[in-house]
Each structure stands twice: as C-alpha cells, then as structure tokens.
Image: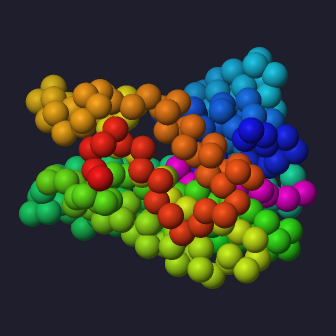
C-alpha cells in the first residue's frame, strides 16, 4: 500500500519539521522528492543526504514562496525538468503571533504572503503539468487553528483557514482532470516552531488534546502520504484532521 514508485513529489518547506518528515516518508515509499527551502541550505542538504543514505532519491531547490511569480515559475520549471509533477505538498509556512491590536500590517502581509499566496502560487505552477497528465495530488498543509481559531494567532488562523477554502474550490475546479486537492490540518506537533512556545503556552495546548500529547512530525507525514497515494484517489475537497482530538 501507498506505493509512490515513479512519482515526482515537490514538498515546500521540506528542510525541517513537518516538511522534512514528509519528504523523507514520500521518498521511502518510492517517490523522487524535490524539497524546497527558503534560507537554510545546510539543513536542506542534510535532509537530501539522509534521504539518499536511506536509499531514496531527492534534491533541494531554493524557493521563496512569498515571491508569487518566482514560486509559480520555479514549480513549473521543476515539473518541466522532471518531465512531470505528480504530487505537490504546500507545507511552507510561518507564524507571527500576537493579538490583533498588536499586529503590524507587515506582519499580516508576511503571514498571508507565505502561508496563503505562496501555496496558491505553487499550486498554479503545478496545475498545468497535472492537467496535461490528467492526474495529480495537491495537498495544502493547514492547521487545527484554521478550523477552531486561537487567541493571539489571528493572522496565522486566517491564512490556514483560507487554505481550506482554497482546497475545496480547487478540488471542484480540477476534479474532471483527475486532480485531487485536499487539506491536512495538524494539531499540536513537536517541531522547531512549537518549541519556541513558552512553557505555559505548551501546557495550555496539551491540556486541550484528549490524547494528552503532541504529535510527532512523522505522524503528520503519514496523513500526507495517504492523501498523496492512489488509495486516496476518491478523496478530494476534504480536510484530514490529525490533531489527537483537539478539534472534533
């Protein structure tokens, strides 16, 4: 099951955290993975080396998803170079937290540019080759916060909620071309991003999770793998929640 042999997968934000786990898992299942990074080339190279050492195939591509035209053209160029693009995992994201009254306009703009516009730019670059092939998987990595909201994360929540609406709309637009589009909504995950939370914030988050613990990045990656696989061919326009019961 979940065999991705011969598939080409592009994972944005693939040098660390959830993206790294996704890239490694897709490669283990046989996909040739192109993982992108914005700044940390060393981390991206380490991830590629780990994939290759485990017997997989991977390469790294620098990509600033906040630059819309650059993101779209880069994804299109990757697909052209590889001959096709079967899977797009739009995972790159940032979180600039704060109550709305304390957020600056540039904080909101930066959050939307990366989390929402960046994902749409990558999808735009991926859709043309997928339409030609009449098959494809697009997966937006959203968040439980986009479903339930969270005080102090209004910009982040707005961007992640928008991804859910985008996935549903794109699913309707391209279902006739054999392309499925879904969103995956992780809950509280042990990553570099959540490690920056204050102890009180971490405790508050954990107290809201019925399973009583944070997810691992590998557990989130498993959900992405399912949506990317042929086993999920009849699933589109959906939100797969991987949140330990945090939001039901």
Indicate whether residue 86 is drawn in magenta: yes
Q: Examine the rendered structure and indicate whether residue 100 appears above or below residue 40.
A: below
x then y, percent, for residue 120: 55, 68
97 vs 9, left or right, is left
x then y, percent, for residue 87: 71, 54
Work out whether residue 168 or residue 70 is closer to the camera in this orientation and state it.
Answer: 168
Residue 125 visible in the snapshot: no
Colour scheme in the image?
rainbow
Q: Which residue lies at the image location 77% right of the left edge and 17% below the top edge?
A: 53
x then y, percent, for residue 227: 62, 52
Q: Which residue lies at the image location 79% right of the left edge and 28% below the top edge?
A: 56
Q: Which residues are magenta?
A: 83-91
Q: Quadrant of the N terminus?
A: top right
39 vs 2, left or right, is left
Q: Which residue lies at the image location 62% right of the left edge and 46% below the top edge?
A: 226
Work out whether residue 93 or residue 106 is closer to the camera in this orientation and state it.
Answer: 93
96 vs 137, left or right, is left
Residue 187 visible in the snapshot: yes
Q: Residue 50: which quarter of the image?
A: top right
Q: Which residue lies at the image location 57% right of the left edge and 32% below the top edge?
A: 21
Q: Examine the rendered structure and indicate whether residue 1 appears above or below residue 104.
A: above
9 vs 159, left or right, is right
Indicate whether residue 209 is drawn in magenta: no
Q: Residue 121: which quarter of the image?
A: bottom right
Give the farthest residue toward the top. 53
Q: Residue 211: which quarter of the image?
A: top left
Total label count?
0
């Amino acid at each position: 099951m979940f065999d991705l042999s011969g598939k080409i997968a592009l994972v944005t934000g693939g040098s660390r955290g959830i993206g790294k786990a996704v890239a490694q898992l897709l490669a283990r299942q046989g996909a040739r993975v192109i993982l992108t990074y914005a700044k940390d080339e060393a981390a991206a190279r380490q991830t590629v080396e780990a994939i290759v050492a485990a017997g997989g195939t991977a390469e790294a591509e620098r990509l600033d998803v906040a630059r819309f035209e650059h993101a779209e053209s880069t994804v299109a160029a990757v697909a052209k170079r590889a001959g096709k693009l079967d899977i797009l995992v739009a995972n790159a994201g940032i979180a600039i937290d704060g109550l709305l009254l304390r957020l600056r306009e540039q904080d909101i703009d930066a959050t939307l540019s990366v989390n929402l516009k960046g994902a749409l730019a990558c999808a735009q670059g991926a859709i043309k080759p997928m339409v030609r092939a009449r098959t494809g998987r697009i997966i937006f990595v959203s968040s439980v916060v986009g479903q339930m909201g969270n005080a102090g994360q209004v910009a982040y929540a707005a961007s992640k909620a928008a991804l859910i609406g985008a996935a549903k709309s794109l699913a309707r637009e391209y279902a006739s071309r054999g392309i499925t589009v879904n969103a995956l909504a992780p809950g509280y995950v042990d990553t570099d991003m959540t490690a920056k939370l204050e102890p009180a914030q971490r405790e508050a988050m954990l107290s809201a999770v019925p399973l009583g613990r944070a997810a691992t990045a590998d557990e989130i990656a498993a959900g992405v793998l399912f949506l990317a696989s042929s086993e999920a061919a009849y699933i589109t326009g959906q939100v797969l929640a991987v949140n330990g019961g945090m939001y039901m």
